[in-house]
Amino acid sequence: MPDNPNRGAVLITGASTGIGRACAEHLDSLGFTVFAGVRKQSDADSLRGVGSGRTQALMLDVTDSQSIAAAMGSVEQATPAGLAGLVNNAGIAVAGPLEFVTLDDWRRQLEVNFIGQVAVTQAALPALRKARGRIVNMTSIGGRLASPFLGPYSASKYALEAITDSLRLELRPFGIEVAAVEPGAVATPIWGKGRAEAEQATANMPAQAMQLYRAGIEALPKIIAQAERSGVAPLEVARAVAHALTASRPKTRYVVGRDAKGRLFLTRLLPTRVMDRIVARAMGI
């Protein structure tokens, strides 16, 4: 894909590390002006000097309406021609047996991974419509194939898949393409954060949780660690995002990673009960 200094502007949420950071660096290299949304000043500082200098850190908390409004005000002022793209990437992972995940943690999971993405999309649509831009939602293979003890995370990604389909049709009359990128395991800090959160959540659960779900709870950190070791590079995901933003006929879904493609293939090949037994055996449940 040739470098082009006139590709327009793109806004990325959750751009401090991992997939979001890789997207910022890759899209900058392709000629986009990048507004990289971060929540901390230290993350903004780390983005200084990235790429060509077209990348600008933007303080953006997707769970704060005032933060979203301020960020979009800055973007609109800097881009009178509108936005060429929005990459909804911000996300967290809440883990644990559904029975014992607190409702506050459920709300936090959905607020960041789903409601926050809807809020940013609503705020960005006038600028996207002006430039006939595109929207890329960072879902997950977990948004099509749920795993035990990752119910909150999968629920948030299933929801994001649903609005991707709705938006794709709703925005078709305006020439706005909408795509979902569905990675499997990616070598990013989210796994370390997820493992720490899982361990903290486990420590705070009542004794009954361990009595009932010990095998699955103890298997989860090991599975997360394995995914962290074997995950694809974030750049591979960033390349899928770039294709969704620039191709004349972008895909509606991009499955990224051998594990994601393998799981999807097996679910099409095998009955659900057989897949359940395979997953249960892998987790010792």
Image (tube, helix red, strand yellow):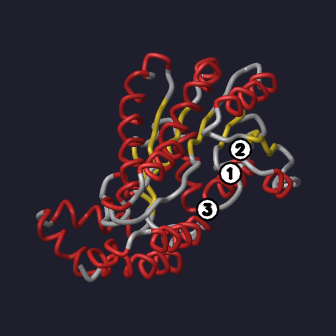
2 and 3 marks in contact (CB < 8 Å): no
Q: Residue at x 31, y 73 (%)?
A: 208
Query: The residue under label 1 is which amino acid type?
Result: Ala
Which circle marks residue 235 in the picture? Answer: 3
Q: Nearer the viewer, residue 163 or 34?
A: 163
- Please count the marks in the image: 3
- Position of residue 85 measured from the top left corner of the image (x, y, whole percent): 62, 34
1 and 2 marks in contact (CB < 8 Å): yes
Between marks 2 and 3, how big is the CA–CA gap? 18 Å
Q: Is residue 248 left or right of residue 154?
A: right
Nearer-N-terminus badge (1/3): 1
Nearer-N-terminus badge (1/2): 1
- Position of residue 48 measured from the top left corner of the image (x, y, whole percent): 87, 53
Instruction: Answer few, some or many: residues within 10 Å of disc 2's Cα (few below 14, many 20 plus, some between 14 and 19).
Output: many
Query: The residue under label 2 is which amino acid type?
Result: Gly
Q: Residue at x 64, y 44 (%)?
A: 13
Q: Residue at x 57, y 48 (%)?
A: 89
Vertical placement of 225 versus 123: above or below? below
1 and 3 marks in contact (CB < 8 Å): no
Q: Nearer the viewer, residue 178 or 3?
A: 178
Query: The residue under label 3 is which amino acid type?
Result: Leu
Instruction: Answer few, some or many: residues within 10 Å of disc 3's Cα (few below 14, many 20 plus, some between 14 and 19).
Output: some
Q: Which residue in the structure is indicated by mark 2?
A: 37
Q: Which residue in the structure is indicated by mark 1?
A: 15
